Amino acid sequence: MTAQELILDEAPGTALEHPWTPAETVRRPTTRRFLGVGATYVAAFAYIVFCLGPILFMVLASLKTDVDIFDPDKLFNFQAISANYEEVLTGNTGAAQAAGSYMGASTGPKALLASAVVTGASTIFALVFGAAAAYGLARYRFKGNRDLAFFILSTRMAPPIAFVVPMYLLFKALNLLDTYFVLIVVYTGMNLSFVVWLLRGFFLEIPIELEESALLDGYGRLEVFRRIALPLAKPGIIAAGIFSAIFAWNEFLFAAILTADNVRTLPVAITGFSTSMGIRWGAFMATAAVAILPIFILTIVLQRQLVRGLTFGAVK
Amino acid sequence: MATIELRHVSKRYGQVVAVQDLSLTCLDGEFFCLLGPSGCGKSSTMRMVAGLETVSAGDVLMDGRRVNDVPPRDRDIAMVFENYALYPHLSVYDNIAMPLHARRLSSAEVDRRVREAAAILSIEELLPRGIKNLSGGQKQRVGIGRAIVREPQLFIMDEPISHLEARLRTDMRTELKRLHTRLAVTTLYVTHDQLEAVALADRIAVLNLGVLQQVGPPAELFDRPANDFVAGFIGSPPMNLIPISAATVEGDALVLVGSQFNVSLPRLGARLRERLTGGPYTLGVRPIDVGLRGVSPESTTRGEIVLRERLGDHDRFIVDCHGETILAEAPPSAPGAAGETIGLVFPPERVHLFDRATGRNLAFVQDAAPSAA
C-alpha cells in the first residue's frame, strides 16, 4: 500500500468516527432546501391564482351571454360571443336590444375616448411640469427650496376625499364641471407631487460635474436640461409616467363627482352597468377587461425601466 | 489662448472664507498649477475662473477683459474633471463631439476634429464604444479629448489624474506635459500632489487656508520657500523643521539655540543680523542638504544614526539628534551605520530660518512677498 492509497483509504474511516458524516451533512440541508423551494412555489402559485383568478373569470364572463354566465356547467365550456366587446368598442347594442335585455345606448366608446384623453393629457402635463419643477428644486439654491419641496410633498398627505366638496364648488363657480379640462387639471395636480419627488431624486443623483461640463462645452441651462439631465433621468420619467397614467386611468371619485354625461371615464362608465333593471354582467365584464388592457400592456412593455425607475440609479 | 488674471479675488460661502484676496496672473501659454492641501481654496479659485462659481469680491480677467458675469458657455474654457464627467448616455465619439455640436459645426468638420483629437490621444479604436466599460485611464483620455477638440482659450484641469493608479498616473503626467508642449494652450492645473505640480508646471501657486503662500517656478519654491508652509509642502521627503528658541550673532556666525542643542552657522550672522525678530524660530534644512561627517572637533552638531535605509541610488538616514529626529539623504558611499554617532553639517547657504510667529523665511526674505502677483 503506497502512502497515497493510505491517505485515500483513511477518508471513509475518519468519517465513520464522527456522527455527522459528510454524506449526512450534505443530505439534510438538501432535503430542507427542496422543501423550502417547493413551499415557495406552492405559495407563489396560490398567490397567482388568488390574483389572476378573478381576472380569468372576468375575461371568461365577457365572452358569454348573460344567461351562460350563471350556468355552472358552462364555466369553461361555452359558446364564445363577441357582442359584449362590440358594444364596448363600437357602441353597437344590437345584440342586447334583440335579446330585450337593454334598450339604451352604449357608453363604451365615449368612455374609452374620455379616459384616453384625460389620462394622456394629465400624464403629459404632470411629466412636463413635474420634470421642470424637480430639476429646479434639485439644481438651484434659493431661499425656501426645501420648504417648497416639502410643501409639494404635503399636498399628498390629506385624503383626496377631503377636497371633493371644495373642488366641486370651485369648478361649479368656474362653470367647468363635466369637461375634459376639469379632470385633466385635477389629475395633473394630484400626480405632480409624486412626479416632482421621484424626479428630484433622480436629478440630485446625476453628478453635478456632468452638467458643469456641458455648461463649459457651450450649452445653456435649458440645453443642459434637455441633453444631459432628461436622458439620464429617463428611467425615473418612465416610472413617474406609468404611475401617473395608472392613477388617472383608474381614478373614480373625482370623475364621478366632477363629470356627468358629457365626459364619463371608464371607471364611472363601468358602474353604469349596474342598472335599476339589474346588472348587465357581460357588457360589464367586457368593459372592465378593456379597461385593464392598456395598463397591462404598458406595464409589461416598460417593466424593466419601471423597476430601474423605482429602485433609483440614474447613473451607475 | 489667453492670459488669466485674478485681482483681489475672494470667495465666501456664508461665514466661511474659501479664498481670500487672491491676486495672480497666469501668462499666455503657461502651464500654471494651483497647489495646496484639501480645503485650501484651489478648487474654488478654479471654479471662479471657469464661471461655475460666483466671485464674492474682486475681478477675474481673461485677456484683460473682466469676465465675472460672463456665463461659462461664453468663456471658451475646456475643463477636464477629476471624476471624468463623461456623459454616460453617449458614445465616446459623441462625448468628444459634444462641444462641437454646441458650436453648430458641420458634421464633416465635427467628424474631422473628433478623429484628429482621438488620434492625438490614440483612442481612435474607442470611438464607437459606450463609456461605461472603459478603464479609468481610457475615460480620462476621452475627457481630455473632449477638452482639446475645441481648441479653447484655456484648459482647466481639476486633479485629472489623481484617480488613476500609480503607474498610469506617471504615464498620463508625461502625456499631459507633451500635450501642452504640442498645443501650447494656457493651462490651469489644480492638484494637491506637489510632485505632480513640480513635474508639470511652469509656475506654481501654493495656497493654504484660502491664502496665497507663494507663486513661482518649481525650482524657486523648492530652493527659496517663502514660508514654513511652502517649505514643508514642496519636496519629498519633506524638509526637516527643527524648533529653535533663540538666535544670536557671534562674529559673522549665527548661533541657534535649540531645545536640546546649539547650531553654529558660519557667514549667516552677517546676512541675517538685520532680520532677526527675537524668536522663536524654526530651522529648515532639506534632507539632501544635510551633510554627514565623521565625528571631529569641529562637528558641533552630533547625532546617533537610528536607521539607514538603502534606496538604490541614495541612502536615507534617520538621525536622532539630542531627541530631535533629522532626516538626511546621502550617497551609498557615505560612512555611518545604525547605532553609530555621526557629525551633522548644515550648509549655511542651503539653510532656512523661519520666524515661528509669521512663518516667514528670514533667509530668503527678498522673495518672501506672499501676495506679490
Image (spheres, rainbow, N blue to C red):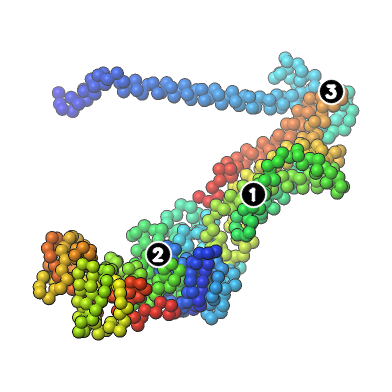
- Residue bearing the label numbered 3: A278
Above or below residue A168? Residue A28 is above
For the residues marked 2 and 3, what is the alpha-carbon distance in whole angstroms? 82 Å
Q: Is residue B54 visible?
A: yes
State how far apart marks 1 and 3 are (Cα). Answer: 48 Å
Q: Position of residue A132 (x, y in %)?
A: 66, 55
| Residue beneath the point at 67% across and 49% down | A152
Q: Indicate left or right for A304 with A267 as reference.
A: left
Return the x and y of residue B287 as percentages of the image width and height.
24, 69
User: Tag 2, which secondary structure?
Assistant: loop
Among the 4 quarters of the image, the one containing residue A92: top right
Badge 1 and badge 2 in a common chain: no
Tally of numbered tags: 3
Task: Say which chain tag 1 marks.
Answer: A
Task: Give the image location of residue B174, x and y in percent.
Answer: 36, 67
Judge depth for marks 1 and 3 and give the one in front: 1
Residue at 44% over, 63% down: B39
Can residue A227 be seen in the rendering of this structure? no
Which residue does the numbered mark 2 point to in the structure image? B37
| Residue pointed to by mark 1 | A150
> Which residue does the image show at 15% across and 26% down from the upper left?
A2
Question: Do the residues marked 1 and 3 share a common chain?
Answer: yes
Of tags 2 and 3, the one toward the viewer is 2
| Quadrant assignment, res A1 | top left
State the mark number for residue B261.
none
